[in-house]
Image (spheres, helix red, strand yellow):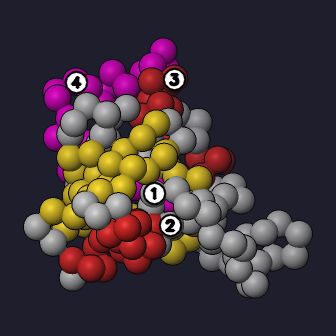
Amino acid sequence: MSIKNLAIALIATVGFSVTAQADHHKGDGMKDGPTITDIVVNSDQHTTLETAVVEAGLADTLAGKGPFTVFAPTDAAFAALPEGTLKTLLMPENQDKLQGILTYHVVEGKVSADKLLGLIETGETMYEVTTMNGEIVARTEGGAVTLEDAQGNRVTVTMTDIEASNGVVHVIDGVLLP
């Protein structure tokens, strides 16, 4: 994937609204096709994310009208967390913390990779993205789009513009922490 396409995908995931498209269902504002939840459930790279979304009680939200942009960590990204972190987060008593982490990966609005790249370029070197639970910084580094969380951790966008009826999904190689 080219650097430009990767950067564009990141821009799309930063939380900018795109006006509704003409191919919506009457009255519900959604296009035909899989929702963000459907995409996660049907991905063999996102089984941990699927479990986390269900345990956090967010499956219905991410299947809702949207639009949303989701930066979706892979199973390998969750596996790279410190030992015991995921198990602890999935405990019922930690649902609020899990929700906070997951909503830190969600932007209200549909942001394509091209749009995200354009926003980064407009900001010259970086762009601050507002998620549903705080800010992340998007930038291009060595031809790739990276996201930096509140802890200073950086993740790379590895796949962009997976279209959903209620938004778009961009795959990332790490877990963002608020």
Residue carrying label 3: 96
Residue carrying label 2: 111
User: Residue 75 magenta-drawn?
Assistant: yes
For the point 59% across and 36% down, the residue is 57
**Mark 4 vs 3, N-terminal side:** 4
Q: Which amino acid does label 2 sit on?
A: Val
Q: Which residue is more in the foreground, 15 or 176?
A: 15
Query: How many C-alpha atoms fall within 10 Å of the one at disc 4: few (<14), some, or many (≥20)?
Result: few
Q: Residue furthest right?
A: 27
- The span from disc 4 to disc 3 (Cα, nearest Å) is 17 Å
Q: In this view, does 156 lie to the left or right of 103?
A: left
Label ID, residue 84: 4
- Image depth: mark 2 or mark 3 in front: 2
Say whether marks 2 and 1 touch (CB < 8 Å): yes
- Image depth: mark 1 or mark 4 in front: 1
Q: Which residue is more in the foreground, 27 or 135?
A: 135
Q: In which quarter of the image is the C terminus?
A: top left
Q: Which amino acid does label 4 sit on?
A: Gly
Q: Which amino acid does label 3 sit on?
A: Asp
Say whether marks 2 and 3 touch (CB < 8 Å): no
**Mark 3 vs 1, N-terminal side:** 1
Stretch in magenta:
69-94
Secondary structure under tag 4 reads: loop
Label ID, residue 14: 1
- Image depth: mark 2 or mark 4 in front: 2
Residue 18: give x, y in percent of width and height: 62, 70
Query: How many C-alpha atoms fall within 10 Å of the one at disc 1: few (<14), some, or many (≥20)?
Result: many
- The span from disc 1 to disc 4 (Cα, nearest Å) is 30 Å
